[in-house]
Image: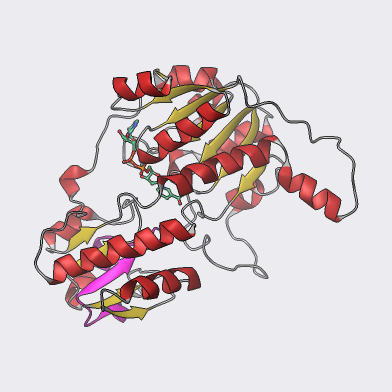
């Protein structure tokens, strides 16, 4: 099937082309993100492949539909960038990659914890400048500390096991607590306000839904332990970035490791070096010595890219052959949990 792939980077292209050798789709790669302005590029294609910072809203979907698109194959786990209700109204099917490597994301979250706690980026910059002093680089033992894992789905569970391996006490919060997992992993499910209040490290692994947007707001930050390390590899808008800025300025937060950012669309995945960064909140966040931002790269391992390519191209094949779309997402599936209790 002819597939228009948007927001393509070299690593996507390599993985998709390699996997496509046994599917035989006709892939056309476009560098721009999929938005209303770029939807025209997909005219004549029955299917498009989108990524997390595309803007597949009602207007984009209408334009895609006008050009003949009937399938949006998201090559991501999250699908908050797609207006599912509008897609259904237009009879455009939407698929995603529910699981490609929970290890990739969980391991990146842990990498952020270790890098922040042991000041690895600062240490690296120092020794490159032949500054071998250690002042300001004191961290803490993770063993014995309390880690709060918010969201115990595929990724959260891998993160839990890694932190348990470090000898941490792990508190979990999820709308659907799992007593078997609790027992087997030796963790405790607690209310979110307890997790916020008692954790030395907090790692977010819930999807972005109306119920989780800004689950870390000013009130939540005020409840956290002074010196907490806050890690977000979920979605940027789980955290109110302005409230985080205030908490960082007040010295209440020990460190923030952010692989995702509320307003990352149009910034992350791009080389903007040599340009003036227009986002004042992100620019300010990048000035803190205890903030580490990565550009939505938690998924970026060879294993994850291969699995993403396989599942995405299999969905396109199933669509082409009129088979059931096992990885379809529909509007009624979106979990509309009440705002997470704090
Ligand atoms: P999952 O669906 O396996 O797990 C999500 C968990 O969150 C479930 O246990 C669910 O019950 C829980 N949950 C949902 N709404 C909640 C609420 N309101 N309050 C508390 N818990 C709630 O998803 P998975 O695979 O673990 O991924 C989690 C998220 O990680 C994705 O939705 C995506 O946004 C993000 N992600 C980020 C990546 C990156 O590169 N930074 C890559 C892949 C995923």
What x and y, as percent, mark residue 89? Answer: 12, 59
In the image, residue 6 above or below residue 259: below
What x and y, as percent, mark residue 231? Answer: 54, 38
What x and y, as percent, mark residue 78? Answer: 34, 50
Q: Residue at x 67, y 29 (%)?
A: 250
**What residue span does the magenta drawing correspond to?**
40-60
Left or right: residue 18 versus residue 250 is: left
Q: Residue at x 23, y 79 (%)?
A: 45
- Residue furthest left in the image: 322
Residue 53 belongs to magenta span: yes
Q: Nearer the viewer, residue 302 or 48?
A: 302
Q: Quadrant for residue 292, please give it.
A: top right
Residue 279 in sight from this viewpoint: yes
Q: Residue at x 34, y 36 (%)?
A: 153
Left or right: residue 221 versus residue 115 is: left
In the image, residue 140 above or below residue 98: above
């Amino acid at each position: 099937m002819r597939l228009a792939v948007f927001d393509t980077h070299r690593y996507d292209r390599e993985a998709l082309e390699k996997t496509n050798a046994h599917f035989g789709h006709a892939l056309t790669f476009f560098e721009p993100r999929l938005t209303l302005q770029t939807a025209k590029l997909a005219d004549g294609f029955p299917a498009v492949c989108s990524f997390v910072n595309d803007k597949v809203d009602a207007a984009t979907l209408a334009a895609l539909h006008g050009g003949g698109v009937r399938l949006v194959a998201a090559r991501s786990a999250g699908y908050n960038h797609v207006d599912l209700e509008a897609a259904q109204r237009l009879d455009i099917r939407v698929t995603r990659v529910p699981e490609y490597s929970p290890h990739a994301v969980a391991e990146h979250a842990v990498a952020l914890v270790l890098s922040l706690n042991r000041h690895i980026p600062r240490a690296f910059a120092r020794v490159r400048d032949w500054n071998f002093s250690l002042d300001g680089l004191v961290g803490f033992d993770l063993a014995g500390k309390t880690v709060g894992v918010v969201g115990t789905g595929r990724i959260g569970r891998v993160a839990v096991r890694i932190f348990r391996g470090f000898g941490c006490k792990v508190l979990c919060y999820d709308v659907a607590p799992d007593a078997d997992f609790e027992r087997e992993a030796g963790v405790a499910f607690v209310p979110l306000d307890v997790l916020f209040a008692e954790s030395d490290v907090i790692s977010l692994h819930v999807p972005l839904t109306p119920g989780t947007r800004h689950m870390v707001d000013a009130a939540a930050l005020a409840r956290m332990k002074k010196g907490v390390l806050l890690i977000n590899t979920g979605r940027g808008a789980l955290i109110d970035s302005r409230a985080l800025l205030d908490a960082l300025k007040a010295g209440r937060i020990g460190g923030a490791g952010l692989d995702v950012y509320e307003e990352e669309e149009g910034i992350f995945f791009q080389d903007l070096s040599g340009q003036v960064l227009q986002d004042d909140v992100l620019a300010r966040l990048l000035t803190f010595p205890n903030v580490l931002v990565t550009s939505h790269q938690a998924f970026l391992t060879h294993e994850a890219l291969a699995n993403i390519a396989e599942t995405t191209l299999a969905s396109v094949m199933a669509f082409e052959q009129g088979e059931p779309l096992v990885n379809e997402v529909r509007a009624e599936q979106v979990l509309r949990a009440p705002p997470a209790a704090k």
